[in-house]
Image (tube, grey):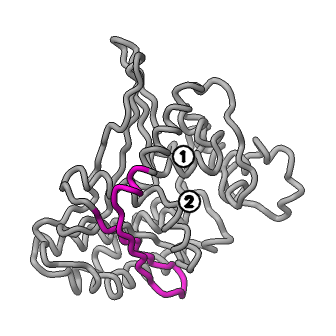
Amino acid sequence: MKLLTAAKDGERTLYLHQSDIGTLRMCPEQARLQLIGEYFDPDSDVAAIGTRTHSFIEFCLHYRQDHGEWPYGTHLLDQLEQESAQLKEDWPHLWLKPHMVPDLFTACLELESCCHRWYNEIVPQIDASNVAGWEIEKRFDIEVAVHWPTADRIRIRGSIDFFDGVNTIWDWKTGRFDRRDGWKKDRYDIQAPMYTYAKSLETGAPSINFNFGYIPRGKSDTHIWGMTLSKGKWAMMLNEVESWGSTILKLGTEDSWPLGPDDWHCSPRWCSEFAQGKCRGSYEESFWPGEQNNLVELKQKVDAGLAPAPAEHHPDE
């Protein structure tokens, strides 16, 4: 999420990603801190496994498109080694969550498993009838509202993991699927409507398919959750985006926004403000016995110049 002000005329442009909407739904104050650059947001070990899996998938898709066949043998092994080596290099700078990933050795095993399972179980489900039309990690940036007389603008941004050149978008999730996930995706998901809307503007299609490809790090089964979206879902998405955007533009960022302390994310496991003893974390240390992680130590290293600052990123890019 970014709010840019033009130097010439003072017009403001607010850029929103689907992940920003998710944060606003969970905790508006965390979203505000992200917007003004005061939220310490290092990649976690779990996120790093997902990033390296995405990199492996991207390599395989490009190889298939460029060579007319899927990579095999040493091509696959060399790429896996590169992804593992990068994970090991990044490890000292990650927010480690031992309750999710016990150690680096386990992380490397889970990364290898995710890559193998995507290749063996998801690839056969990919439509290869128009390989020339495949789009891999393609970004979009679309204006959805202009507010007069101020001429403030609201735009949506994102990066589509994969479009099969026919009518289906894919998004890769390195996590376990259960039936509640499908129920939530059908009713509340913002990513699928946003991404299919962007693609519909490009292709003119009245509806677009969206597949979530779940690749679990553990022993659960891979799963594909498919949806078909059209103007009804797109209208709901645009309404929510404009509503949040208008509220942000009116409120400004100087004063605190409401907290969202009533769900799983409000804990030292998932919120760096809480983990640093700020926000709700300044009141409820005793509620989380034994909750220790390296977040505070990592922040101290960054502040002292002993570790790189987290790169600005979005989970959907």
The image quadrant of residue 196 is: bottom left
Location of residue 268 with respect to 11 vertically, above or below:
below
Horizontal side, residue 56 vs residue 93: left or right: left
| Front residue of 16 and 105 | 16
- The label on residue 121 is none
Residue 177 inside the magenta-drawn segment: no
Residue 228 inside the magenta-drawn segment: yes
Instruction: Identify the residue at horizontal 49%, vertical 51% (top origin).
Output: 19
The image quadrant of residue 226 is: bottom left
Name the amino acid type tagged 1: Ala
Magenta stretch, residue numbers: 207-235
Residue count near mark 1 (Cα–Cα under 10 Å), binned few <14, some 14–19, many ≥20? some
Tell me, yes or no, if residue 208 can be seen here: yes
Instruction: Identify the residue at horizontal 17%, vertical 78% (top origin).
Output: 128
Residue 174 place in picture, x, y as percent: 47, 72
- The label on residue 307 is 1
Q: Disc 2 designates what residue?
A: 44
Residue 131 place in picture, x, y as percent: 13, 72
Secondary structure of residue under mark 2: loop
Residue 224 place in picture, x, y as percent: 41, 79
Name the amino acid type tagged 2: Ser
Location of residue 222 with respect to 230 vertically, above or below:
below
